[in-house]
Every structure is written in structure tokens, then in C-alpha cells.
């Protein structure tokens, strides 16, 4: 069950000239994008870059002194070890980081972060961060289900075009989760001149797009350069439409935890591939597709706005804040739900009912129908008819 730290032990002494860039390097740099590099890595308008080795030194100093509350900004507990392991390796230590941006705007509903890494092989990897713990970041992800584009996608296009001017050589683009979505979207919409320089596009367990995106001429031009990876129990990477094939990667964890790149198993030059996703992943995929298809764009938008309006009533701005003050937050959200007008409550009931009904209709995907509670063993295993919307009325 080797992971990216094992890879660093195997390949850390070989630079990119001796051992060319491979998919494991992609997930390492994609994971690195989650580190809070504010005040460490130069921004898009600054000329100089900084080596990973020096960035790690500054990061450690900030972490020790908890400058700008940097400890609370570290999303994954393994991240400090990752940057220090990279810094001590010959392969990554001298790679230069630049163009860092971290932008959160609750009014525009945008969460956008990216950076560039020059790997020393005359190429540059432009990496987009995935969704962080902020509610605005998750809200923007949900907005993809009814919008042709969201603000972060548009900003990713402009960022790619701007940073492409800084380099003359080949470009790679990639990211994890929403970051992979941004990478594909930016590559599809950056214009032919920049597109011709892009050699590879990495999408690591990323959500897909509104159908209008993958039918566009820009996407068609870059489709064959997209490397899409998902773990065998993927949920996020199965959402919406992708328009291209994906490779399934073995993970050491189960369920949603497989979304974490640290759990992906690797070899010396690649990741460990398996034949297909799990039955559970196919069930979730089919259920969500059925659910989304049952809602028009207008209803999706209303439902998502209502849901996040209730979350906002908690006064928390992120998942950690919500967890920290859960009891008070829950009380505020229940009060907000109680004050919601009847038409909104009806929409919430109806939409959630559609989700549960979609799950019931697609339960055959599991191949274990006889084991679930919706089955009545005394009536030839036919589903029990349940008025789910009526049941939800007790809570919504």
C-alpha cells in the first residue's frame, strides 16, 4: 500500500531530467496547492519565484509562531510533512513556486486559489486548488449544477492566460477536486495560442461540468490531453458530465475518504490502477444523475440557495467553525428553517424527496436489494411504497 511518501523515498533523488514528470508528480503538486502560501510564495504580478526548500523553511517558521493563524489554515494533517519531505529531496527541493493567489469573495460566491511550479525541465505546471473548508467554496461547487460557468472557472481562464505569458516552454495544467475541474475548464477556454502549448491536463477526482461546457469547441480541442483519475469508490469525481474516459485508482481508505490524495496507492512511476469503480460508487453516480435530471436549472438554483441560506444562519463561515460551535449553530439553523416561507420549505421537501426516490429507483445497481430496509421480504421483494415527501414534512 505505497503512497506518495513512499514515492518520494524512491524517486526523491532523481530530478525531472533523469526521471520525467509522471502522474504521481501530478498528485503531489496538486496536494501541495492546499498549503496556505500567503506571504510565502510570490503572487501573479511578482517576477521572482521561491524554491520549495526556502518556502518550507518560511512555512515552518510561520507554523511555529502561528503567524496569521496559519495552523488553522492547514487543511490536511500530512501537509507540513509533505512540504518538508519535498524540500529535503533533490527532485523537488529546487523547484520554484510562483504566481500564488488565494481569493475568497462571499458576495461573488467565489473561492479560487492557484500557483505555478517550474520543475526545471523547461516546463511549468499550473495547479489549481480544490474546494477548501469555506461554505462559499462548497456553494460555488453546487452552483456548477445549474450554471454554464461559475466565477472560479472564469478566473481560472484568466489566470492561465496570464501565467502562460511568463513562460516560453510547454505547460501542464491540473488540480484535485474542484481544482481539476478548473484546470480542464481553463484549458478548454484559454484560446488556441495557449492551448497549443498545453501538453497534459490532470483532473484528480474532480466534478464534471454542465453539458454545455463539454459540447463546446474548446473542450473538443483539448479532450485527448485530459488525464482523469478517480478512486474506486469515487463520489465527487462521478458528479456531472466529463466528456472523456477516466482511470480508476486504488485507494487505501474506504468511502468518501478515498477522495484524499494521500490515500491513493502508487508505484515508482505511476499510480495503481484497478479495472472499475465499486458497486457503491456506481449506485451513487446513478442516483445523483437521476436526481439532477429530475430538476430543471431553476429548481436546482432555488434549492441550493435555500440550503446554503440555512447554513449561513449558523453564522459559521466554514466547516471547522460549524463543528466548533455545533450546538449553537444547529439552533440558529433550525430557527432559520422555521422562519422560511412555506413555498421554500415545500421546495426543500420536494427536492429531498426526489433524491430519496432516485436512490430507491436505482437500488438495483447495488445487487444486494434483499439486504436493504426498503424491501419487504414477505411480498416477493418488491419495494415498500413510502411517501417520502410526507415523511420529510415532519422535519422540513
Image (tube, rainbow, N blue to C red):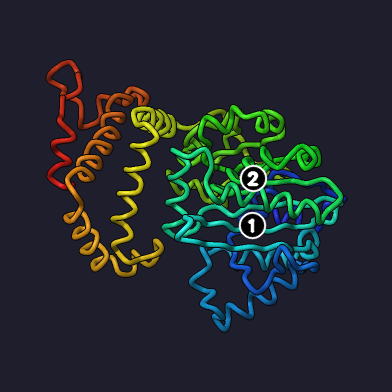
* Residue lying at 63% horizontally and 40% vertically, measured from the top left: 184
* Residue lying at 33% horizontally and 22% vertically, measured from the top left: 364
Where in the figure is residue 135, as x and y percent of width and height? Answer: 41, 58
Q: Is residue 14 visible?
A: no
Question: In the rendered view, would you say 253 is above or below 230?
Answer: below
Residue that badge 1 annotates: 114
Q: Residue furthest bottom?
A: 65
* Residue lying at 46% horizontally and 32% vertically, measured from the top left: 278
Q: Secondary structure at mark 2?
A: helix
* Image quadrant in which you'd find residue 273: top right
User: Left or right: where does residue 27 sit relative to residue 315?
Assistant: right
Residue nearest the observer in this picture, 336 or 280: 336
Residue nearest the observer in this picture, 357 or 334: 334
User: Left or right: where does residue 299 sit relative to residue 214?
Assistant: left
Q: Secondary structure at mark 1?
A: strand
Residue that badge 2 annotates: 183
Residue nearest the observer in this picture, 10 or 161: 161
Q: In terms of sequence position, does the residue under pointer 2 or pointer 1 come before the other?
A: 1
Question: In the rendered view, would you say 232 is above or below 174?
Answer: above
* Residue lying at 24% horizontally and 31% vertically, measured from the top left: 372
User: Left or right: where does residue 203 sit relative to residue 391?
Assistant: right
Where in the figure is residue 329, as x and y percent of width and height? Answer: 27, 65
Q: Is residue 286 visible?
A: yes
In space, the residues marked 2 and 1 are separated at their CA atoms by 10 Å
Amino acid at each position: 500500500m505505497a503512497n506518495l511518501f513512499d514515492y518520494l523515498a524512491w524517486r526523491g533523488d532523481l530530478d525531472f531530467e533523469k526521471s520525467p514528470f509522471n502522474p504521481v508528480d501530478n498528485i503531489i503538486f496538486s496536494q501541495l496547492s492546499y498549503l496556505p502560501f500567503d506571504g510565502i510564495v510570490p503572487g501573479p504580478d511578482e517576477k521572482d519565484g521561491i524554491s520549495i526548500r526556502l518556502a518550507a523553511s518560511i512555512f515552518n517558521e510561520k507554523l511555529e509562531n502561528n503567524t496569521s493563524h496559519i495552523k488553522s489554515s492547514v487543511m490536511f494533517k500530512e501537509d507540513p510533512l509533505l512540504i518538508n519531505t519535498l524540500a529535503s529531496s533533490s527532485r523537488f527541493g529546487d523547484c520554484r513556486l510562483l504566481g500564488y493567489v488565494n481569493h475568497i469573495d462571499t458576495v461573488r460566491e467565489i473561492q479560487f486559489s492557484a500557483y505555478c511550479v517550474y520543475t526545471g525541465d523547461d516546463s511549468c505546471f499550473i495547479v489549481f486548488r480544490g474546494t477548501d473548508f469555506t461554505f462559499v467554496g462548497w456553494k460555488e461547487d453546487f452552483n456548477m449544477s445549474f450554471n454554464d460557468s461559475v466565477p472560479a472557472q472564469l478566473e481560472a481562464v484568466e489566470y492561465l492566460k496570464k501565467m502562460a505569458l511568463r513562460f516560453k516552454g510547454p505547460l501542464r495544467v491540473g488540480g484535485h477536486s474542484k481544482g481539476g475541474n478548473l484546470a480542464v475548464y481553463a484549458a478548454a477556454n484559454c484560446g488556441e495560442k495557449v492551448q497549443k502549448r498545453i501538453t497534459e491536463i490532470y483532473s484528480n477526482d474532480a466534478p464534471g461540468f454542465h453539458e454545455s461546457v463539454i459540447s463546446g469547441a474548446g473542450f473538443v480541442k483539448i479532450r485527448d490531453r485530459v488525464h482523469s483519475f478517480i478512486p474506486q469508490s469515487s463520489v465527487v469525481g462521478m458528479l456531472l458530465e466529463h466528456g472523456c474516459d477516466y482511470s480508476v485508482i486504488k485507494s487505501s481508505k474506504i468511502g468518501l475518504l478515498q477522495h484524499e490524495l494521500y490515500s491513493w496507492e502508487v508505484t515508482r512511476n505511476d499510480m495503481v490502477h484497478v479495472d472499475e469503480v465499486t458497486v457503491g460508487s456506481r449506485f451513487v453516480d446513478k442516483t445523483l444523475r437521476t436526481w439532477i435530471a429530475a430538476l430543471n436549472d431553476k429548481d436546482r438554483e432555488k434549492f441550493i440557495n435555500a440550503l446554503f441560506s440555512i447554513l449561513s444562519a449558523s453564522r459559521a463561515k466554514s466547516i471547522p467553525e460549524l463543528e466548533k460551535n455545533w450546538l449553537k449553530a444547529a439552533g440558529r439553523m433550525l430557527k432559520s428553517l422555521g422562519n422560511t416561507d412555506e413555498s421554500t420549505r415545500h421546495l426543500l421537501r420536494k427536492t429531498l424527496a426526489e433524491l430519496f426516490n432516485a436512490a430507491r429507483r436505482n437500488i438495483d445497481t447495488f445487487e444486494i436489494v434483499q439486504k436493504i430496509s426498503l424491501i419487504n421480504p414477505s411480498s416477493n421483494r418488491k419495494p415498500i411504497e413510502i411517501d417520502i415527501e410526507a415523511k420529510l414534512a415532519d422535519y422540513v
